Image (spheres, helix red, strand yellow):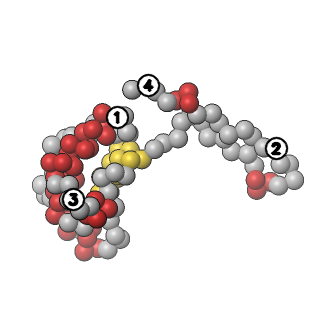
Amino acid sequence: MKSPVGKYRPFPTIHLPDRPVAQPYAPEGSPVVACVDLRDGNQALAQPMNVSQKLEMFDALVRCGFKEIEVGFPAASNTEFEFVRRLIEDKRIPDDVTIQVLVQAREDLIEPRCRHSWEPNG
């Protein structure tokens, strides 16, 4: 896959000396794109993906070059939880790839899920 780095140019700077709040900002480099194709919205599909299909899709996204991948909402279903667990336990996440998960900020969803076999005290 050809690197898209040269495809993007910084936004031209606009000089507005009378508006100090609107100081120019031009990001450097390419934008970071986080893939959300594995997110929990999968449950809305007529035929939701199973764990094996999600693993295959994750591997394909990594091969495409994504470095940030939202992998789902583990508290939403056993499939979502098992998929994320397999990614971690099978060490399928390359060192240069960051995964993201969604979770409601509720203690009953966060605390019990923190005690699993991949943790030293699990």
Q: Do the residues labelled 3 and 2 touch (CB within 8 Å)?
A: no
Residue 11 occupies which quadrant of the picture?
Answer: top right
Label 1–label 4 contact, CB within 8 A: no
Where is 91 relative to 7, above or below? below
Q: Are marks 4 and 2 in contact (CB under 8 Å)?
A: no
Spot the residue most to the top: 2
Few, some or many residues within 10 Å of mark 2 (<14, 14–19, 20+) = few
Mark 1 residue type: Cys
Q: Which amino acid does label 3 sit on?
A: Pro
Disc 4 or disc 2, which is closer to the eye? 4
Check residue 2 in the rendering and tell me which mark sits there, or answer none. Answer: 4
Residues 113 and 16: in front is: 16
Q: What residue type is labelled 2?
A: His
Badge 2 or badge 1: first in the primary sequence: 2
Which quadrant, please, contains the N terminus?
A: top left
Badges 3 and 4: C-beta atoms under 8 Å apart?
Answer: no
Q: Name the residue under label 3.
A: 48
Q: Mark 1 points at which residue?
A: 64
Q: Residue 15 carries which label?
A: 2
Judge from the rendering whether residue 42 lies leftward or rightward of residue 29; answer left or right.
Answer: left
Q: Nearer the viewer, mark 2 or mark 1?
A: 1
Rendering coords of residue 97 (x, y %): 34, 40
Give the residue displayed 49% in from the left and 30% down from the top. 4
